[in-house]
Image: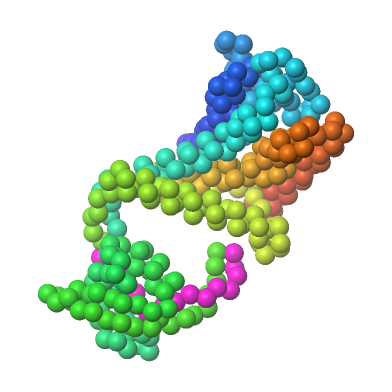
Amino acid sequence: MSLALSLLALSFLIFFHELGHFLVARAFGVKVEVFSIGFGKKLIAKTYKGTQYTLSLIPLGGYVKMKGQNDSDPLEQSSDTDSYTSKAPWQRICILLAGPLFNILLAFFIYSSLSFGDKQVLLPILGEIKEGYPASEVGLKSGDQILSINGEKMRTWREMAEIIASSPSLSLQVKRENQILSFSLQSKEVEGKNIFGESKKHYVIGVGAKGEFGSMHFGVLEALKNGAISTYENSTLIVEGIKKLIVGVVPTSEVGGVVSIVQVMHKASESGWISFALLVALISINLGVLNLLPIPALDGGHILFNLYEMVTRKPPSVNMLYYLTIGGWAVLLGLMLLGLYNDLHRILL
C-alpha cells in the first residue's frame, strides 16, 4: 500500500508541475492540446474544450503539449494567435517558469501546514556538560535553561544549536531554578563534516540536551515564516548539491533515479505521514530546481532560448535550436541511465 502511495504522490507532484504550465498558458491565450500524466500507452483520454486530458501507462512523468511547441520536434512552429510561439518571449518565460514555481509553492504550503498549530519541541535545557569546554569553564550546569543568546530569545534546542554553531562569542541569559543568571563565554572552534562530506569549521560550547520537550503554538504568520525558511534552505541545499556534483565533490555514484525516489518515499511512508509529507515537499523542490537547469530539453533550457531572443531581438537559428535540443535530450538520457544504473547497483549489491 505504501508503494502505491509513493507512486501516487510522485504522480501528483508531476501533475502539479504541469498544472502550472497549463494555467499560465491558458491565461495568456495559448491553446493546450494535450495535458498528460504519465508516458506510453494512453489508459484514459478525454477531450474537453479543445484539450485532451490523458492518463498514461507509465505514471513517472508527464507533459503539457501546447500549440506550436513540441519537445520531440524542436522545429515545430505556429503563427496562429493561440499558439505558444506567437507569444512574446516574456510571456513564454512566464509559462515555462510556472511549472517549477508551482512545485516550489507546493513545498512551501506543505512546510507551512506542518508548522501550524501546537507542536512538541525539544527545549533548550542543558543535560550533559562536557569537561574542558567553555560551558563547563564558566559554570553552566545540567538543568540550566537557556533563555536568550546575544539578546535573542531561545525557545527550542534547534534555535540554540544553530546560533551557537555560528557564534565565536556568546552572551547567555540562563534560568537556574528560581534565578536568572548571565554568562559570557568564547565558543570553541572545531572541524566537522558538512552534508557533502567536506570539512567545515563551526563553534561548540560542550553541552548536550537534557531531552525535555514542551508544547509550542505556531500561528499563521509564524507557520508561513517557517515554511518560507524551510523552502529557501532546502532549495539552496539542492542547488549546492548540483554544484558539488558538477565539480566532483559529490561522486556520480550518488546520483539516483526514479527507483531510488520511490524506495525512499516508501520507507518514509512507513515512518509516518509527517516524514512522508516532508519528503514529498523536498522532492517537489528538487523537481522544481532541476527543471530550471539550463539544459535545452528542460524548462530552464527553453527559458534560456527566450532570454536570448529578448536580448538579440531575434530567435535562435533553426540549426542552433535543433542541435542544442538534441544535445539536451542526450544529456537527460545519460543522467537517467546513470540514475538507473546506480539504482540497480544498490539493489543488487
Span of residues in magenta: 196-212
| Relative vertical location of residue 48 with respect to residue 309 in this rendering, above or below | above
Please identify the quadrant where the C terminus is shown.
bottom right
Residue 40 counted in the magenta span = no
Provide residue 339's location: percent of width, then percent of height.
Answer: 69, 48
Most extreme residue toward the right is 319
Residue found 71% across the figure and 21% down from its top: 86
The number of callouts visible is: 0
Most extreme residue toward the left is 178
Q: How is the image coloured?
A: rainbow
Provide residue 168's location: percent of width, then percent of height.
Answer: 42, 78
In this rendering, would 50 be left or right of 173?
A: right
Residue 211 counted in the magenta span = yes
| Relative vertical location of residue 242 with respect to residue 318 in this rendering, above or below | below
| Relative vertical location of residue 92 with respect to residue 215 in this rendering, above or below | above
Which is nearer the eye, 53 or 316?
316
Residue found 25% across the figure and 54% down from its top: 216
Provide residue 219's location: percent of width, then percent of height.
Answer: 27, 46
Which is nearer the eye, 122 or 146?
146
In this rendering, would 108 be left or right of 40?
A: left
Provide residue 80's location: percent of width, then percent of height.
Answer: 72, 14
Residue found 35% across the figure and 77% down from its top: 170
Q: Quadrant of residue 333?
A: top right
| Relative vertical location of residue 165 with respect to residue 258 in this rendering, above or below | below
Residue found 27% across the figure and 81% down from its top: 183
